[in-house]
Amino acid sequence: MSIRTPLAEKLILISLAIFCFMTLGSMATMSIGTAFLILPFVAMKRTKVFGSAPAGFSVSEGTVGQYLRITAALVSALAFSLVVAKNWPLSYSGKISEVQFADDLKKVWHLFIPPIVAYCFVLVPETSRRKIGVAYGVVFLIFSVIGFQQFFTGWPRPQGVPEWPGRFHSTIFLGHHLSLASIWIFPWFVALELAFSGKESLRVRAFAWACVVFGGASLFFSLSRMLWVALPVGIALWTVLRLPGKLRIAAVAALVLIAGVATQIPAISLRLNSHIGAGTRVELWKANWEFFKARPWTGVGFRHTQEMSGLYLMEKFNSQDVFSGHAHNNFLEMLGGSGILGTLAWLAWCFFWFQQSYVLLQTKSSKVLFGLGPSAWGRALLAVGVVFQLNGLTQVNFWEAKVMHSLTFFMGLLLAARVEFRK
Protein backbone atom coordinates (compact mmCIF):
# COMPACT_ATOMS: atom_id res chain seq x y z
CA MET A 1 0.00 0.00 0.00
CA SER A 2 1.76 3.18 -1.15
CA ILE A 3 1.80 6.34 -3.24
CA ARG A 4 4.63 6.05 -5.72
CA THR A 5 5.88 9.68 -5.78
CA PRO A 6 6.19 12.48 -3.18
CA LEU A 7 4.44 14.86 -5.59
CA ALA A 8 1.44 12.53 -5.81
CA GLU A 9 1.30 12.27 -2.03
CA LYS A 10 1.27 16.06 -1.72
CA LEU A 11 -1.48 16.28 -4.31
CA ILE A 12 -3.71 13.79 -2.53
CA LEU A 13 -3.09 15.51 0.82
CA ILE A 14 -4.07 18.89 -0.62
CA SER A 15 -7.13 17.33 -2.23
CA LEU A 16 -8.20 15.72 1.03
CA ALA A 17 -7.66 18.91 3.04
CA ILE A 18 -9.69 21.02 0.61
CA PHE A 19 -12.45 18.41 0.53
CA CYS A 20 -12.63 18.22 4.33
CA PHE A 21 -12.91 21.86 5.22
CA MET A 22 -15.11 22.64 2.19
CA THR A 23 -17.78 20.39 3.75
CA LEU A 24 -18.24 23.11 6.39
CA GLY A 25 -18.97 25.88 3.89
CA SER A 26 -21.79 26.67 1.49
CA MET A 27 -23.29 24.30 -1.08
CA ALA A 28 -21.00 25.76 -3.76
CA THR A 29 -17.82 25.18 -1.75
CA MET A 30 -18.93 21.63 -0.91
CA SER A 31 -19.29 20.78 -4.60
CA ILE A 32 -15.90 22.34 -5.37
CA GLY A 33 -14.34 20.36 -2.52
CA THR A 34 -15.76 17.10 -3.81
CA ALA A 35 -14.38 17.84 -7.29
CA PHE A 36 -10.96 18.47 -5.70
CA LEU A 37 -11.16 14.99 -4.18
CA ILE A 38 -12.57 12.98 -7.08
CA LEU A 39 -10.67 14.40 -10.06
CA PRO A 40 -7.11 13.90 -8.68
CA PHE A 41 -8.14 10.49 -7.33
CA VAL A 42 -9.41 9.32 -10.72
CA ALA A 43 -6.38 10.78 -12.52
CA MET A 44 -3.91 9.07 -10.19
CA LYS A 45 -5.75 5.77 -10.37
CA ARG A 46 -5.66 5.88 -14.17
CA THR A 47 -1.96 6.76 -14.29
CA LYS A 48 -1.18 4.11 -11.64
CA VAL A 49 0.47 6.62 -9.32
CA PHE A 50 -1.01 4.66 -6.43
CA GLY A 51 0.74 1.47 -5.49
CA SER A 52 -1.17 -1.60 -4.41
CA ALA A 53 -4.67 -0.99 -3.07
CA PRO A 54 -5.00 -0.81 0.72
CA ALA A 55 -5.88 -4.13 2.33
CA GLY A 56 -9.60 -4.41 2.95
CA PHE A 57 -10.70 -2.54 -0.18
CA SER A 58 -12.53 -5.27 -2.00
CA VAL A 59 -15.86 -4.87 -3.78
CA SER A 60 -16.78 -8.47 -3.04
CA GLU A 61 -15.81 -8.74 0.63
CA GLY A 62 -14.94 -6.84 3.79
CA THR A 63 -16.48 -3.71 5.26
CA VAL A 64 -16.11 -1.63 2.10
CA GLY A 65 -17.64 -4.37 -0.01
CA GLN A 66 -20.56 -4.66 2.40
CA TYR A 67 -21.10 -0.91 2.24
CA LEU A 68 -21.11 -0.91 -1.57
CA ARG A 69 -23.63 -3.77 -1.71
CA ILE A 70 -25.98 -2.02 0.72
CA THR A 71 -25.65 1.24 -1.20
CA ALA A 72 -26.29 -0.51 -4.51
CA ALA A 73 -29.43 -2.09 -3.03
CA LEU A 74 -30.64 1.32 -1.82
CA VAL A 75 -30.03 3.02 -5.18
CA SER A 76 -31.74 0.12 -6.99
CA ALA A 77 -34.81 0.39 -4.76
CA LEU A 78 -35.01 4.15 -5.35
CA ALA A 79 -34.64 3.71 -9.11
CA PHE A 80 -37.33 1.00 -9.10
CA SER A 81 -39.75 3.34 -7.31
CA LEU A 82 -39.25 5.82 -10.15
CA VAL A 83 -39.83 3.14 -12.80
CA VAL A 84 -43.17 2.31 -11.16
CA ALA A 85 -44.08 5.99 -10.77
CA LYS A 86 -43.25 6.61 -14.43
CA ASN A 87 -45.27 3.71 -15.81
CA TRP A 88 -48.10 3.45 -13.27
CA PRO A 89 -48.40 6.95 -11.79
CA LEU A 90 -50.69 8.00 -8.96
CA SER A 91 -52.94 10.98 -9.64
CA TYR A 92 -54.02 13.78 -7.28
CA SER A 93 -55.92 16.93 -8.24
CA GLY A 94 -56.07 15.49 -11.75
CA LYS A 95 -52.29 15.54 -12.15
CA ILE A 96 -49.45 13.03 -12.03
CA SER A 97 -45.78 13.39 -11.12
CA GLU A 98 -43.23 14.10 -13.83
CA VAL A 99 -40.46 11.54 -13.46
CA GLN A 100 -37.03 12.59 -14.74
CA PHE A 101 -34.61 9.80 -13.86
CA ALA A 102 -31.39 11.79 -14.14
CA ASP A 103 -32.72 14.68 -12.08
CA ASP A 104 -34.51 12.51 -9.51
CA LEU A 105 -31.43 10.38 -8.85
CA LYS A 106 -28.87 13.19 -8.94
CA LYS A 107 -28.23 13.07 -5.18
CA VAL A 108 -27.40 9.37 -4.93
CA TRP A 109 -23.84 9.92 -6.21
CA HIS A 110 -22.98 11.20 -2.73
CA LEU A 111 -23.43 7.66 -1.43
CA PHE A 112 -20.48 6.42 -3.49
CA ILE A 113 -18.03 9.00 -2.11
CA PRO A 114 -17.24 7.23 1.23
CA PRO A 115 -15.05 4.45 -0.26
CA ILE A 116 -12.95 7.10 -2.06
CA VAL A 117 -12.56 9.09 1.17
CA ALA A 118 -11.63 5.94 3.07
CA TYR A 119 -9.18 4.78 0.38
CA CYS A 120 -7.30 8.09 0.43
CA PHE A 121 -7.16 8.38 4.22
CA VAL A 122 -5.92 4.82 4.67
CA LEU A 123 -3.33 5.40 1.97
CA VAL A 124 -1.64 8.38 3.66
CA PRO A 125 0.37 8.12 6.92
CA GLU A 126 -1.01 9.27 10.28
CA THR A 127 1.35 12.25 10.43
CA SER A 128 -0.18 13.56 7.21
CA ARG A 129 -3.70 12.78 8.38
CA ARG A 130 -3.12 14.86 11.50
CA LYS A 131 -2.11 17.85 9.39
CA ILE A 132 -5.40 17.55 7.53
CA GLY A 133 -7.22 17.20 10.85
CA VAL A 134 -5.60 20.39 12.14
CA ALA A 135 -6.64 22.32 9.02
CA TYR A 136 -10.19 20.99 9.31
CA GLY A 137 -10.29 21.79 13.03
CA VAL A 138 -9.08 25.36 12.51
CA VAL A 139 -11.80 25.99 9.91
CA PHE A 140 -14.40 24.42 12.20
CA LEU A 141 -13.34 26.64 15.11
CA ILE A 142 -13.28 29.84 13.03
CA PHE A 143 -16.71 29.10 11.57
CA SER A 144 -18.04 28.20 15.03
CA VAL A 145 -16.90 31.58 16.37
CA ILE A 146 -18.74 33.19 13.45
CA GLY A 147 -21.82 31.14 14.37
CA PHE A 148 -21.58 32.29 17.97
CA GLN A 149 -21.51 35.99 17.11
CA GLN A 150 -24.14 35.52 14.40
CA PHE A 151 -26.74 34.90 17.08
CA PHE A 152 -26.24 38.48 18.28
CA THR A 153 -25.44 40.31 15.01
CA GLY A 154 -27.00 38.26 12.22
CA TRP A 155 -23.81 38.40 10.14
CA PRO A 156 -23.15 36.91 7.61
CA ARG A 157 -26.69 35.70 6.80
CA PRO A 158 -29.40 37.04 9.11
CA GLN A 159 -32.26 34.62 9.79
CA GLY A 160 -34.46 36.15 12.47
CA VAL A 161 -35.97 34.26 15.40
CA PRO A 162 -39.73 35.03 15.74
CA GLU A 163 -39.80 34.27 19.48
CA TRP A 164 -36.60 36.24 20.21
CA PRO A 165 -36.74 39.64 18.45
CA GLY A 166 -33.30 41.05 17.74
CA ARG A 167 -31.66 37.62 17.79
CA PHE A 168 -30.76 35.39 14.86
CA HIS A 169 -30.35 31.69 14.08
CA SER A 170 -26.75 30.49 13.76
CA THR A 171 -26.46 29.32 10.17
CA ILE A 172 -22.88 30.46 9.37
CA PHE A 173 -22.56 29.95 5.58
CA LEU A 174 -25.01 27.03 5.36
CA GLY A 175 -28.12 29.10 4.68
CA HIS A 176 -30.47 27.42 7.16
CA HIS A 177 -30.34 26.67 10.87
CA LEU A 178 -31.54 23.08 10.40
CA SER A 179 -28.63 22.42 8.05
CA LEU A 180 -26.19 23.51 10.74
CA ALA A 181 -28.00 21.36 13.32
CA SER A 182 -27.26 18.23 11.27
CA ILE A 183 -23.78 19.13 9.98
CA TRP A 184 -22.01 20.58 13.02
CA ILE A 185 -22.74 17.48 15.14
CA PHE A 186 -20.21 15.40 13.16
CA PRO A 187 -17.02 17.33 13.97
CA TRP A 188 -18.39 18.38 17.38
CA PHE A 189 -18.43 14.85 18.80
CA VAL A 190 -14.94 14.17 17.43
CA ALA A 191 -13.75 17.36 19.15
CA LEU A 192 -15.42 16.14 22.35
CA GLU A 193 -13.43 12.91 22.17
CA LEU A 194 -10.17 14.77 21.61
CA ALA A 195 -10.94 17.16 24.49
CA PHE A 196 -11.14 14.21 26.90
CA SER A 197 -8.29 12.24 25.35
CA GLY A 198 -5.56 11.37 27.82
CA LYS A 199 -3.13 10.64 24.98
CA GLU A 200 -3.10 14.15 23.53
CA SER A 201 -1.00 17.12 24.63
CA LEU A 202 -2.44 19.95 26.66
CA ARG A 203 -2.30 22.21 23.61
CA VAL A 204 -4.32 19.79 21.48
CA ARG A 205 -6.90 19.31 24.24
CA ALA A 206 -7.18 23.07 24.78
CA PHE A 207 -7.81 23.52 21.06
CA ALA A 208 -10.38 20.71 21.12
CA TRP A 209 -12.13 22.35 24.09
CA ALA A 210 -12.34 25.61 22.14
CA CYS A 211 -14.02 23.66 19.33
CA VAL A 212 -16.39 22.02 21.81
CA VAL A 213 -17.36 25.34 23.43
CA PHE A 214 -17.82 27.45 20.30
CA GLY A 215 -19.12 24.55 18.19
CA GLY A 216 -21.61 23.73 20.94
CA ALA A 217 -22.67 27.38 21.15
CA SER A 218 -23.30 27.43 17.39
CA LEU A 219 -25.37 24.27 17.68
CA PHE A 220 -27.40 25.70 20.56
CA PHE A 221 -27.87 29.03 18.79
CA SER A 222 -29.12 27.27 15.68
CA LEU A 223 -32.26 27.17 17.86
CA SER A 224 -33.39 23.89 16.34
CA ARG A 225 -35.93 22.59 18.85
CA MET A 226 -35.36 18.99 17.81
CA LEU A 227 -31.62 19.41 18.25
CA TRP A 228 -32.21 20.77 21.75
CA VAL A 229 -33.73 17.36 22.51
CA ALA A 230 -31.43 15.22 20.36
CA LEU A 231 -28.06 16.63 21.40
CA PRO A 232 -28.51 15.98 25.15
CA VAL A 233 -29.55 12.41 24.28
CA GLY A 234 -26.38 11.99 22.21
CA ILE A 235 -24.22 13.45 24.97
CA ALA A 236 -25.87 11.13 27.51
CA LEU A 237 -25.15 8.12 25.29
CA TRP A 238 -21.54 9.24 24.80
CA THR A 239 -21.20 9.67 28.57
CA VAL A 240 -22.60 6.22 29.31
CA LEU A 241 -20.22 4.64 26.79
CA ARG A 242 -17.18 6.50 28.10
CA LEU A 243 -17.47 6.61 31.89
CA PRO A 244 -17.41 3.64 34.26
CA GLY A 245 -20.04 2.60 36.83
CA LYS A 246 -21.21 5.26 39.27
CA LEU A 247 -19.53 8.08 37.38
CA ARG A 248 -21.74 7.51 34.35
CA ILE A 249 -24.86 7.52 36.56
CA ALA A 250 -23.78 10.77 38.20
CA ALA A 251 -22.95 12.38 34.85
CA VAL A 252 -26.27 11.40 33.25
CA ALA A 253 -28.13 12.62 36.34
CA ALA A 254 -26.30 15.95 36.07
CA LEU A 255 -27.24 16.20 32.38
CA VAL A 256 -30.90 15.55 33.17
CA LEU A 257 -30.81 18.17 35.93
CA ILE A 258 -29.18 20.76 33.66
CA ALA A 259 -31.68 20.05 30.88
CA GLY A 260 -34.57 20.31 33.32
CA VAL A 261 -33.38 23.65 34.65
CA ALA A 262 -32.78 24.94 31.10
CA THR A 263 -36.38 24.22 30.08
CA GLN A 264 -37.56 26.51 32.89
CA ILE A 265 -35.73 29.50 31.45
CA PRO A 266 -38.51 31.65 29.92
CA ALA A 267 -36.77 32.31 26.57
CA ILE A 268 -35.95 28.61 26.07
CA SER A 269 -39.42 27.52 27.20
CA LEU A 270 -41.00 29.97 24.74
CA ARG A 271 -38.95 28.54 21.87
CA LEU A 272 -39.61 24.92 22.83
CA ASN A 273 -43.35 25.46 23.13
CA SER A 274 -43.65 27.39 19.88
CA HIS A 275 -46.05 25.76 17.43
CA ILE A 276 -44.63 27.47 14.35
CA GLY A 277 -44.50 24.92 11.53
CA ALA A 278 -46.13 22.15 13.57
CA GLY A 279 -49.46 22.12 11.71
CA THR A 280 -47.90 22.00 8.25
CA ARG A 281 -45.56 19.19 9.30
CA VAL A 282 -48.46 17.09 10.57
CA GLU A 283 -50.32 17.51 7.27
CA LEU A 284 -47.23 16.49 5.33
CA TRP A 285 -46.82 13.42 7.55
CA LYS A 286 -50.43 12.46 6.86
CA ALA A 287 -49.94 12.98 3.12
CA ASN A 288 -46.92 10.67 3.01
CA TRP A 289 -48.76 8.05 5.01
CA GLU A 290 -51.51 8.19 2.39
CA PHE A 291 -48.92 7.74 -0.37
CA PHE A 292 -47.65 4.65 1.43
CA LYS A 293 -51.16 3.21 1.75
CA ALA A 294 -51.86 3.89 -1.92
CA ARG A 295 -48.59 2.36 -3.14
CA PRO A 296 -47.08 0.35 -0.23
CA TRP A 297 -44.16 -1.29 -2.05
CA THR A 298 -42.77 1.64 -4.05
CA GLY A 299 -44.49 4.86 -2.91
CA VAL A 300 -45.09 7.80 -5.23
CA GLY A 301 -41.50 7.80 -6.49
CA PHE A 302 -38.24 8.85 -4.89
CA ARG A 303 -38.00 12.66 -4.45
CA HIS A 304 -41.59 13.16 -5.62
CA THR A 305 -43.17 13.53 -2.19
CA GLN A 306 -42.88 17.33 -2.27
CA GLU A 307 -44.58 17.60 -5.65
CA MET A 308 -47.29 15.07 -4.83
CA SER A 309 -47.99 16.37 -1.31
CA GLY A 310 -49.01 19.72 -2.80
CA LEU A 311 -51.38 18.01 -5.23
CA TYR A 312 -52.75 15.72 -2.52
CA LEU A 313 -53.41 18.57 -0.08
CA MET A 314 -55.06 20.70 -2.77
CA GLU A 315 -57.40 17.80 -3.45
CA LYS A 316 -57.96 17.14 0.27
CA PHE A 317 -58.78 20.74 1.21
CA ASN A 318 -60.20 21.79 -2.19
CA SER A 319 -57.86 24.78 -2.14
CA GLN A 320 -54.85 26.08 -4.02
CA ASP A 321 -53.46 27.69 -0.86
CA VAL A 322 -51.59 24.77 0.71
CA PHE A 323 -48.05 24.21 1.95
CA SER A 324 -46.18 21.56 -0.03
CA GLY A 325 -42.82 20.15 0.90
CA HIS A 326 -40.92 16.99 1.66
CA ALA A 327 -42.18 14.84 4.52
CA HIS A 328 -40.11 16.56 7.27
CA ASN A 329 -39.37 13.08 8.59
CA ASN A 330 -36.75 10.72 7.16
CA PHE A 331 -38.77 7.56 7.72
CA LEU A 332 -42.02 8.91 6.29
CA GLU A 333 -40.13 10.48 3.38
CA MET A 334 -38.76 7.06 2.48
CA LEU A 335 -42.05 5.29 3.11
CA GLY A 336 -44.11 7.74 1.06
CA GLY A 337 -41.54 8.18 -1.69
CA SER A 338 -40.09 4.69 -2.16
CA GLY A 339 -42.39 2.38 -0.19
CA ILE A 340 -41.39 -0.70 1.76
CA LEU A 341 -38.56 -1.64 -0.62
CA GLY A 342 -36.82 1.72 -0.44
CA THR A 343 -37.42 2.08 3.29
CA LEU A 344 -35.93 -1.31 4.11
CA ALA A 345 -32.86 -0.54 1.98
CA TRP A 346 -32.48 2.86 3.68
CA LEU A 347 -32.83 1.28 7.13
CA ALA A 348 -30.10 -1.22 6.17
CA TRP A 349 -27.83 1.71 5.22
CA CYS A 350 -28.49 3.40 8.56
CA PHE A 351 -28.07 0.13 10.46
CA PHE A 352 -24.68 -0.32 8.80
CA TRP A 353 -23.54 2.96 10.41
CA PHE A 354 -24.54 1.81 13.89
CA GLN A 355 -23.29 -1.75 13.44
CA GLN A 356 -19.85 -0.71 12.23
CA SER A 357 -19.58 2.01 14.89
CA TYR A 358 -20.34 -0.58 17.55
CA VAL A 359 -17.68 -2.90 16.10
CA LEU A 360 -15.18 -0.02 16.43
CA LEU A 361 -16.29 0.52 20.01
CA GLN A 362 -15.40 -3.09 20.80
CA THR A 363 -12.12 -3.11 18.84
CA LYS A 364 -8.78 -3.08 20.68
CA SER A 365 -5.87 -1.54 18.82
CA SER A 366 -2.89 0.69 19.57
CA LYS A 367 -3.23 2.39 16.19
CA VAL A 368 -4.85 5.80 15.80
CA LEU A 369 -6.77 7.68 13.11
CA PHE A 370 -6.50 11.46 13.56
CA GLY A 371 -5.17 10.80 17.04
CA LEU A 372 -8.14 8.70 18.14
CA GLY A 373 -8.28 4.97 18.72
CA PRO A 374 -11.10 2.64 17.60
CA SER A 375 -13.21 2.88 20.77
CA ALA A 376 -13.11 6.70 20.63
CA TRP A 377 -14.29 6.65 17.03
CA GLY A 378 -16.99 4.14 17.93
CA ARG A 379 -18.36 6.34 20.74
CA ALA A 380 -18.30 9.51 18.67
CA LEU A 381 -19.95 7.93 15.64
CA LEU A 382 -22.63 6.15 17.68
CA ALA A 383 -23.54 9.42 19.41
CA VAL A 384 -23.54 11.30 16.10
CA GLY A 385 -25.77 8.64 14.54
CA VAL A 386 -28.34 8.91 17.33
CA VAL A 387 -28.46 12.72 17.19
CA PHE A 388 -28.66 12.67 13.40
CA GLN A 389 -31.59 10.24 13.36
CA LEU A 390 -33.44 12.14 16.10
CA ASN A 391 -32.99 15.33 14.07
CA GLY A 392 -34.52 13.41 11.18
CA LEU A 393 -37.80 13.00 13.05
CA THR A 394 -38.80 16.54 12.06
CA GLN A 395 -36.73 17.12 8.91
CA VAL A 396 -35.41 15.16 5.95
CA ASN A 397 -31.77 15.71 6.82
CA PHE A 398 -30.58 12.49 5.18
CA TRP A 399 -31.33 13.68 1.64
CA GLU A 400 -30.41 17.35 2.08
CA ALA A 401 -27.44 17.84 -0.25
CA LYS A 402 -25.44 20.03 2.17
CA VAL A 403 -25.89 17.51 4.97
CA MET A 404 -25.07 14.60 2.66
CA HIS A 405 -21.57 15.99 2.13
CA SER A 406 -20.80 15.67 5.86
CA LEU A 407 -22.74 12.42 6.25
CA THR A 408 -20.83 10.67 3.47
CA PHE A 409 -17.52 12.26 4.55
CA PHE A 410 -17.89 10.74 8.00
CA MET A 411 -19.12 7.46 6.56
CA GLY A 412 -15.81 7.50 4.68
CA LEU A 413 -13.99 8.03 7.99
CA LEU A 414 -15.98 5.15 9.48
CA LEU A 415 -14.88 2.88 6.62
CA ALA A 416 -11.29 4.12 6.97
CA ALA A 417 -11.33 3.36 10.69
CA ARG A 418 -12.65 -0.15 10.12
CA VAL A 419 -9.95 -0.86 7.54
CA GLU A 420 -7.15 0.85 9.48
CA PHE A 421 -7.84 -0.83 12.81
CA ARG A 422 -8.21 -4.25 11.20
CA LYS A 423 -4.70 -4.17 9.73
Image (tube, grey):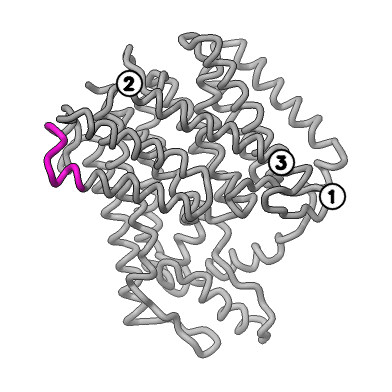
Q: What residue would you read off at disc 3?
A: 221
At horizontal 77% and vertical 57% (from top left) the residue drawn is 275
Residue type marked 2: Glu
Q: In this view, does 360 lie above or below 344?
A: above
Alpha carbon separation for disc pair 2 and 1: 46 Å
Residue neighbourhood size for the residue with mark 2, other residues' Cα within 10 Å, grouped as few (<14), some (14–19), many (≥20): some
Residue denoted by label 1: 166
Residue 344, quarter of the rendered image: bottom left
Direction from residue 74 to residue 399 in the image, left or right: right
Kindly state the secondary structure of the residue where label 1 is placed: loop
Callout 2 secondary element: helix
Instruction: Tell me which numbered mark, 1 or 3, is placed earlier along the sequence.
Output: 1
Circle 1 residues within 10 Å: few <14, some 14–19, many ≥20? few
Residue toward you, 124 or 326: 124
Q: Mark 1 to mark 3: distance in Å?
A: 13 Å
Amino acid type indicated by mark 3: Phe
